[in-house]
Image (spheres, rainbow, N blue to C red):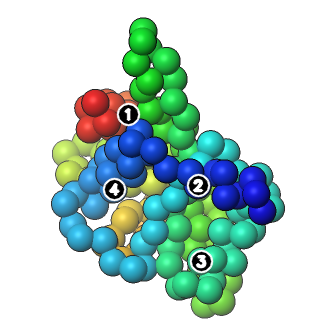
Amino acid sequence: METLAKAFEVDDDARTCVAAVSQLLTGHAVLGAGLTFVLSSGLDQQELERLGQIAAATGADILNLDYRTDMVGSDDVPVLNHVDLVMVRRRTCYVYTRCRLSVPRGAEHAVLVPRTGARFHFRAEPNEIVQVRGRARDVAAGVARADHKLTTLMA
């Protein structure tokens, strides 16, 4: 599990990324123990399964922020690749990989959109992730809005 431990090393860019995504998803709400953010630079299947075990043991929904740092000029800039969602409901662990943040037109908060083809999306509450029936509206434009807002929050 050395790889998993390395995946969760935290620096200032990582803290900035977590704070920005949290604000984008929940505003300024105080998060409860039922919603946990972790960071990685890519998890393999075994590491995702370990997150599932942690979610089952703690009862928390886990959002893994897959991020990297790019060089722009002489500055390191944090970039969010995607979000993996791990949650346990009725003793079954659900894992949704490579979700995107999307801000629907006129909405205050982002939603999590699974890969293409899903007939649902997720919204974050301060203590859990809630599955919402139906596809998110205007996903391409919503992803662009989320990217813009995230870049602004992480600056």
SS at mark 3 in the image: helix
Q: Horizontally, is 83 left or right of 11 in the view? A: right
Query: Mark 4 or mark 1: which is in front?
Result: 4
Label 1 crowd bin: few (<14), some (14–19), many (20+), radius 10 Å = some
Write down the residue under mark 2.
Answer: 8
Q: Is residue 45 above or below residue 14?
A: below
SS at mark 1 in the image: helix
Write down the residue under mark 1.
Answer: 147
Residue 125 found in image quarter: bottom left
* C-alpha separation, residue under disc 4 versus residue under disc 3: 18 Å
Residue 2 at x, y percent in the picture: 76, 57
Write down the residue under mark 4.
Answer: 22
Q: Horizontally, is 60 left or right of 128 in the view? A: right
Q: Is residue 58 above or below residue 148?
A: below
Query: Mark 3 or mark 1: which is in front?
Result: 3
Label 3 crowd bin: few (<14), some (14–19), many (20+), radius 10 Å = many
Quadrant in the picture for the C terminus: top left
Sooner in the amino-acid sequence: mark 4 or mark 2: 2
Query: Mark 2 or mark 3: which is in front?
Result: 2
Residue 30 found in image quarter: bottom left
Is residue 99 among the parts visible in the rendering? no
Q: Is residue 76 above or below residue 15?
A: above
* C-alpha separation, residue under disc 3 versus residue under disc 1: 27 Å
Q: Residue type at mark 3: give it.
A: Ala
Q: Residue type at mark 2: give it.
A: Phe
